[in-house]
Image: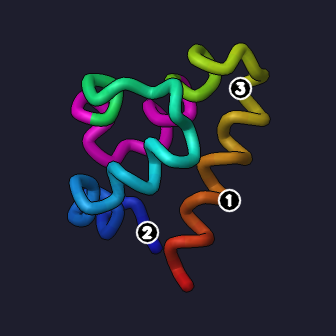
Amino acid sequence: MNEDTIKGRWKQLGGSIRHKWGKLTDNDLTVAEGSAEYLAGKVQERYGIARDEAEKQVREFQQTLRH
């Protein structure tokens, strides 16, 4: 699923995103508005992990949406 499709389904995906990354706030998701880059930054910040790891987690999450 490409980023445009994710942006279109962003509100529907909020529950799945919160389930995977429970430390993200509703405001984080609102501001992200489907941006994988912003989401990775917030995952990095909230979980104290490296940027590469956060980007990897977001990519893996995006891949699960394709199925």
In this picture, is 60 found above or below 36? below
Which stretch appears magenta?
Answer: 30-41
For the point 39% across and 60% down, the residue is: 3
Q: Position of residue 11 (x, y in %)?
A: 22, 54
Query: Up-down: is 29 above or below 34?
Result: above
User: Horizontal placement of 56 versus 11: left or right?
Assistant: right
Q: Nearer the viewer, residue 66 or 16?
A: 16
Q: Is there a contact, CB below 8 Å, between mark 3 and mark 2? A: no
The residue indicated by pointer 3 is 51
Task: Tell whether position 39 is magenta.
Answer: yes
- Give the structural element (helix, strand or loop) at label 1: helix
Q: Residues within 10 Å of mark 3 (few under 14, many from 20)?
A: some
Tally of numbered tags: 3
Using a 10 Å C-alpha cutoff, classify the residue at mark 2 as few (fewer than 14 neighbours), some (14 to 19) or many (20 or more): few
**Mark pair 1, 3: CA separation:** 14 Å
Our reading of the magenta stretch's main secondary structure is helix
